[in-house]
């Protein structure tokens, strides 16, 4: 299983925001730190804002910051809010045409693993994985 880049970027944005407390940070600043497209980050920040993890401030001196304390942001909630689906195999989805589905036992095993994955993420919050501002070194072109 692999999380999408969108979810990876969402977790990184939250880590960066958490490291700066209530200070508003910008998309440009975040894009520079991670070397990620500003356009992609705009979409990520928008979704995180709509989901209630970030608060955005528009305008010349605007930016974004955490909308909740880091200990209130469960990693499982972030992943569920940013992943499009958890269809690990065809039979998890709505377009299932697998011949052996009625007798297959793999779906149960994979579902158990998926539930364990989600449960582990739900046990941890952003506060558990926070970094200090100094841990975010700005990338420089060579």
Image (spheres, rainbow, N blue to C red):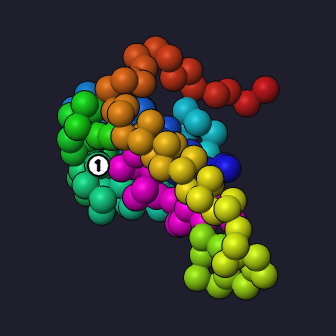
| Residue range (magenta) | 76-89
- For disc 1, the marked residue is 54
Q: x%, y% of residue 135?
A: 50, 17
Q: Is residue 96 left or right of residue 9?
A: right
In the rendered image, which quarter is residue 105 located in?
bottom right
Residue at screen point 59% across, 59% down: 108
Any part of residue 76 in sight: yes
Q: Nearer the viewer, residue 111 or 34?
A: 111
Q: x%, y% of residue 107?
A: 63, 63
Quadrant in the picture for the C terminus = top right
In the rendered image, which quarter is residue 139 located in?
top right
Any part of residue 28 in sight: no
Residue at screen point 41% across, 42% down: 119
Does the segment drawn in magenta span residue 78? yes
Residue at screen point 37% across, 40% down: 122
Exactly how many numbered labels are in the figure?
1
Q: Is residue 48 left or right of residue 137?
A: left
Does the segment drawn in magenta span residue 45? no
Q: x%, y% of residue 96?
A: 67, 82
Q: Is residue 118 above or below residue 82?
A: above
**Local crowd at mark 1 within 10 Å, few (<14), some, or many (≥20)?**
many
Residue at screen point 60% across, 75% down: 93
Q: Nearer the viewer, residue 53 or 96?
A: 96
Q: Secondary structure at mark 1?
A: strand
Q: Is residue 1 above or below residue 92?
A: above
Q: Is residue 83 above or below residue 21?
A: below
Q: x%, y% of residue 101?
A: 69, 76
């Amino acid at each position: 299983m692999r999380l999408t880049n969108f979810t990876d970027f969402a977790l990184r944005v939250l880590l960066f925001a958490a490291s700066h407390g209530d200070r508003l940070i910008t998309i440009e600043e975040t894009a520079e730190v991670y070397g990620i497209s500003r356009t992609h980050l705009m979409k990520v920040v928008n979704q995180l804002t709509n989901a209630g993890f970030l608060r955005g401030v528009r305008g010349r001196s605007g930016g974004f910051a955490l909308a909740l304390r880091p200990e209130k942001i469960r990693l499982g909630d972030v992943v569920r809010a940013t992943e499009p689906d958890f269809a690990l195999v065809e039979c998890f989805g709505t377009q299932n045409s697998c011949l052996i589905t009625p007798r297959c036992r793999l779906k149960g095993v994979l579902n158990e693993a998926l539930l364990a994955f989600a449960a582990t993420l739900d046990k941890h919050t952003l506060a558990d994985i926070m970094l200090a501002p100094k841990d975010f070194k700005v990338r420089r072109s060579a």
